[in-house]
Structures are given as C-alpha cells and as structure tokens.
Amino acid sequence: MLEKMFKLSEKNTTVKTELLAGLTTFLAMAYILAVNPGMLKETGMNQQSVFLATAISSGIATLLMGLLANYPVALSAGMGVNALFTYTICLTMGFSWKAGLAAVVISGIIFVILSVTNLRKLVIDAIPTQLKLAIGAGIGFFIAFIGLKNAGIIVSDASTFVTLGNFKDPAVLLALFGLVVTLILLAKKVHAAVFYGLLMTAIVGVLAGLMGIAEMPALPSKLISFDFEMPTLFAFAQGFGELFADPKSAFIAIFSLLFVDFFDTAGTLVGVANRTNLINEKGELENIEAALLSDSIGTVVGGVLGTSTVTSFVESTAGVEVGGRTGLTAVTTAVLFFLSVFFSPILVTITNAVTAPALVVVGILMAQQLGGIDWDNFVYAASGFVTVITMILCYSISHGIIFGFITYALSSLASGKGKDIKPIVWVLVVIFVIYLAI
C-alpha cells in the first residue's frame, strides 16, 4: 500500500528511511511549537491556544503535502511571517489579533484560488534554473545562520552587527559538540548522520542537565497534557469588521502576508526539489500544483484555528538529508505534530542547542548547489550572488528572491539578453518594485 501511494522504489527509498526522515524533520522544526505561541502572545492571544492551533494546523497541512503532492516537505507557522503578523499588522498598524487572523484567512483563500488557477505554478516555473540553484544554496546559508544564531554561537553586536557568542555558555558548548559530532558522522558517511547527531546532542544535554549544568535540555516533569481550551478557534470571523474599517490598511496587511508567504514557499519548495530530484528536464517542479494547494489550504486552516500563516518549512531539508524522498516523510512528521498536542511537555528536551547542529550541517549540504551555477556568466553570477547575500543579510528568503530577480532582469537587459527573459519575469519585477516602495 505504501509503495503504491508514495512510489518508494521509484524514488529509491524505503519505509524505514522515510520514517527516520520524518522524525528528523519534526525534531528540526519542533522549536516552532514553543517559539510561535511565545511570539503571538504579545498580541494578546492565549499562548496555549496558539500552541494547539500551531500543532494541529501543522499536522493537517503537512499531511496534505504528503498525501496530495508526495513531497517530503513539512509545514507550520512560518518564522518571519509570524513576526510580520505580530509586530507589523498588530502592534504597529494597530489591528487586533482577531483582525490579523481575518487577514491570514483571506490571504489563504486568495492563495487557494491562485493555486487552482495555476498562477503560482507559472511564477515558480518562470524562475531560471540557475536562479533556482542560487535560491537553494541561499536557503542553505540562511538556515545555517538561523542555527548558529539560535544556538548563541553567533550573536548581535552594536559595532560589527554580528560576532562570536560566549563560548563559556553551556548551551553554546552543547551546540558546538553536536556540530562536531554531526560533521564527523557525515565525513564518515554514516547513514542518517543528521538524525544521530540530533539524538546524541539531546542525550548529552540531558545528562549534563542532570549533573547540575545550567541551560541544558531537561527531562519533562510529565509526559502527557490534556489542556485543549482554544479561544482562538474561529475568532477570525470576529475580525472582518475591524479589518475592513480601513480598506487601505487592510490591503497592505493582506498583500504583505500574500507576498512574504508566496516567495518564502517558492524558495523552500525549489530548495527541497533541488535536493530530491523533483525538478524535471524542463526545469519545472513535479506535481507542484498539489504542493502549492496543500500550502494554501494550510494557511486557511491555521487562520481558522488561530495562528499566523502556515507555510512550507525550510527545515524540511533536515529530513531530506537523512534520505527522505516522498510524502511518507511528510506524513510521519504530520503524525508527530498531532501527537505533540498530547506530549507537549517532552518539547523541553528539544532546545535550540540540540537542533542547531542539524541546521548548520544541512546548510553546508545545500550550499553545494552553488557548484551548478555558471559563474563565468555574469548574469547568473550577479543574480546568484545577490540572491544568497540578501537572504542572509536581510534574514529573509523572500527578499533574497526579490533582489535576485531584479538583478537577473537588469543584468540580462544590460548584456543584451533581455529577449530571453519570460514576460512573467518582467511582471514580477514591476510587482517587486511596487512592494518595496510600499
């Protein structure tokens, strides 16, 4: 049955590998179950309710991605877009969290329409193959930076913007230990090295914590929780009146959610596809329509339950590097998200120090895509470089894609290759410029 559903032999994988990959993906992104409620509570939302909404919507969206698209991609409330929801739409523009959820649901419905009409597919297919490689590599650098930052290995600095963290900090030392162990396992070509690196780091961290060392992963005080109160459920329906009381602000809020989610998703799917041979000989992503529809439905479900935009997660690459190649990986991750509703206390064991090594190593593996770029061609070299550097310095996948597209179009035009650019690319460039102006 699994062979028929997920085409395991065709993708050169096994049930065991897929299950392990799904577990690895979940471990790599489980932090969102703690981070997202902590951020959205600043808008006045109930933290436990947001936790439940995040876990359930992640499970539903990821299950759809696995069953409909057969992609090894997991989804959850996106980092970046949740900050947009909290700090811009609610705290800066002044919308209540209910109005913000209404904007999320509307943007999700628009995405469903765009996915059904294949407009999103046309945009993704319009991205040149060389730029797709740059996007994938850029995401690698981006996710590695996230890992280094979350672990405290890299910290902010008033003079140099970023600098090395405190290497006397136990959590930093644990992350460094995990990174070294995972790199050694990879160098020795150990199968599922990323997962074993995660497991070993968690075990060492828990043991260190039991010995009295501070800031270490902790054993949970209990295993199961049955707190299912959800005041955010269907609360979006109460926010429409407030949202459209100011049509201009409503447009900006909805457009911003649409834009960031659109290109974060595009970048993530392209990055994962580059690592899993999901791109055909025409440079197009296989079965992309179903993947985009799953992502769109996830956004609607998340808004209805009570969380910010649900989107494809770049941490899915952690499972891909373990060997995940089919939707069975996603289905496994989805089941774990559903189970996390009951086993939320266990999440105290999965700290940033535990997941950081996996993110850094995955970044290294994804950065290898830079080798496929024709660096002797200035158009590809310029657009590829700008894509990568912007993703890192602006801390945004979508901004990297924006400036990469603009650089590609302008450098092509300047080098006399403007006729080779698809019309939709010029349309996107105009939209990008308008978005930046807004």
Image: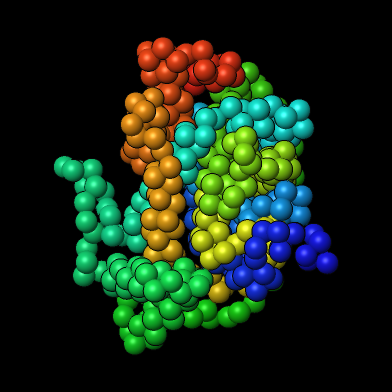
In the depicted view, which residue is nearer to us: 90 or 85? 85
Colouring style: rainbow
Q: Position of residue 418 (x, y in %)?
A: 47, 13
User: Nearest the camera: 402 or 257?
Assistant: 402
Q: Position of residue 40 (x, y in %)?
A: 53, 48
Q: Position of residue 412 (x, y in %)?
A: 42, 18
Residue under the point 53% across and 40% down: 267
The residue nearer to you, when weighing 394 against 85, is 394
Q: Residue at x 39, y 74 (%)?
A: 188
| Residue visible at 37% across and 13% down in the picture | 414
Q: Is residue 9 left or right of residue 188?
A: right
Query: How many numbered callouts?
Result: 0
Left or right: residue 14 compared with residue 26 = right
Q: Is residue 235 visible?
A: no
Q: Is residue 109 above or below residue 40?
A: above
Residue 152 showing in the rendered view: yes
- Where is 400 relative to 57, above or below? above
Residue 371 in the figure: left or right of residue 291: left
Where 240 falls versus 195 (above or below)?
A: above
- Quarter of the picture containing the N terminus is bottom right
Residue that lies at the very extreme toward the bottom in this rendered image: 211
Q: Nearer the viewer, residue 147 or 247?
A: 147
For this orientation, the residue located farthest to the left is 159
As drawn, 382 above or below 396: above
How far across and down, in percent of the image, does residue 76 sit? 60, 51
Q: Tell me which residue sits at (46%, 74%) in the image.
A: 190
